[in-house]
Amino acid sequence: MPGTNPRELGLLADCESCFGLCCVALPFSASADFATDKDAGQPCHNLRDDFRCSIHQQLRQRGFPGCTVYDCFGAGQKVSQVTFEARSWREAPGTARQMYAVFPVMRQLHELLWYLAEALTLEPATPIHPELRHTLEETERLTREGAHVLEKLDVAAHRADVNALLLRTSELVRAGREGKDRRGADLIGAKLKGAGLRAANLRGAYLIGADLRGADLRQADLIGADLRGADLAGADLTGAFFLTQAQLNAAKGDAATLLPASLTHPAHWADPRTAPGPDARSRPGRASRTPRRR
Ligand code: SF4
């Protein structure tokens, strides 16, 4: 039976064990986040033959901040080492198409595992822990299916089922606190300095470039909230849940920002020169890219 520890579940990205899948399988467009365009399935010109990034130490300075804020949740190494049994797309070019198709599916499954594992640590959600546990086990089982199954998996349907459970989790955690409901709200560039957003529902909210300095975000549900370029300096996110390190990496903040215990202050918060900019509208989609290797 899988536990709830992200490391034990294999949800921490291990670029050393991956065939650079996020640098090949995913597309990106020239924007504030990426210096160039790249089609899906085309290796990034910065990807070396050993699957490492040639500009890893200068990603932000070289115009690729988007690469520093993506998290595959361990999907890259799972596809590389488990699904395709450690044979890379360079060694077996005939598997490349399928590998690139499986990667985003696996990434979604691993992201769901991440949230389910966190939900199982939230005490107010205890009444639905059996359902959460069952769904986590089923999701974990799916990640071990063969490439031909994963490639055709209706991951959107599975995601919808999991999301219903995560919504119930959110309601249980925020119960009795009368937090604001800003689910999916367009709060791009919003002036929310010092705002009272305790226990708010900010699921999928667009907070790109928002001024959240000093805001009270305790026990807020931040699943999928787009925090690119948002300023969290001095904000209190104690107990905020379904918040990922990648979301924080895309935001700005400072030493006074209070975070949930499982998350850390991104290195760039100490150096404003490398902070992400607020202009992320130029890039379609909300998935960004990865903190890749040395
Ligand atoms: S981390 Fe970014 S710049 Fe580096 S190889 Fe991957 S996609 Fe290219």
Image (spheres, rainbow, N blue to C red):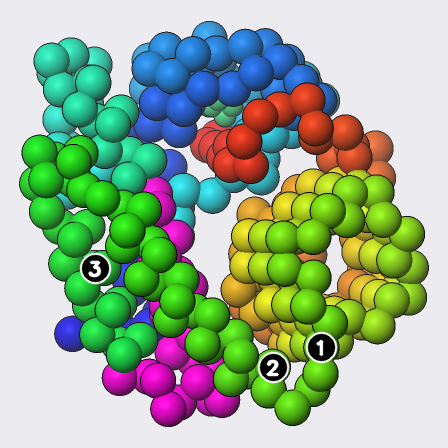
**Residue type pointed to by label 3:** Glu
Q: Residue at x 65, y 91 (%)?
A: 176
Where's residue 139, x and y in %? Answer: 23, 59
As drawn, the label of residue 256 is none
Give the quarter of the image for residue 17: top left
Q: Dot 2 corresponds to which residue?
A: 174
Q: Dot 1 corresponds to which residue?
A: 179
Give the quarter of the image for residue 240: bottom right
Say whether residue 283 is left or right of residue 237.
left
Q: Residue at x 54, y 31 (%)?
A: 285
Q: Residue at x 34, y 63 (%)?
A: 162
| C-alpha gap between disc 1 and disc 2 | 7 Å
Q: Confirm whether residue 248 shows in the render.
A: no
**Residue type pointed to by label 1:** Gly
Sequence-wise, the earlier of marks 1 and 2 is 2
Give the SS element for disc 1: loop
- Marks 1 and 2 in Cβ contact (< 8 Å): yes
- Marks 3 and 2 in Cβ contact (< 8 Å): no
Where's residue 261, x and y in %? Answer: 60, 73
Say whether residue 18 is left or right of residue 27.
left
Tell me the magenta residue range.
107-130
| C-alpha gap between disc 3 and disc 1 | 32 Å
- Position of 28 relative to 178 (above/below): above
Say whether residue 163 is left or right of residue 257.
left
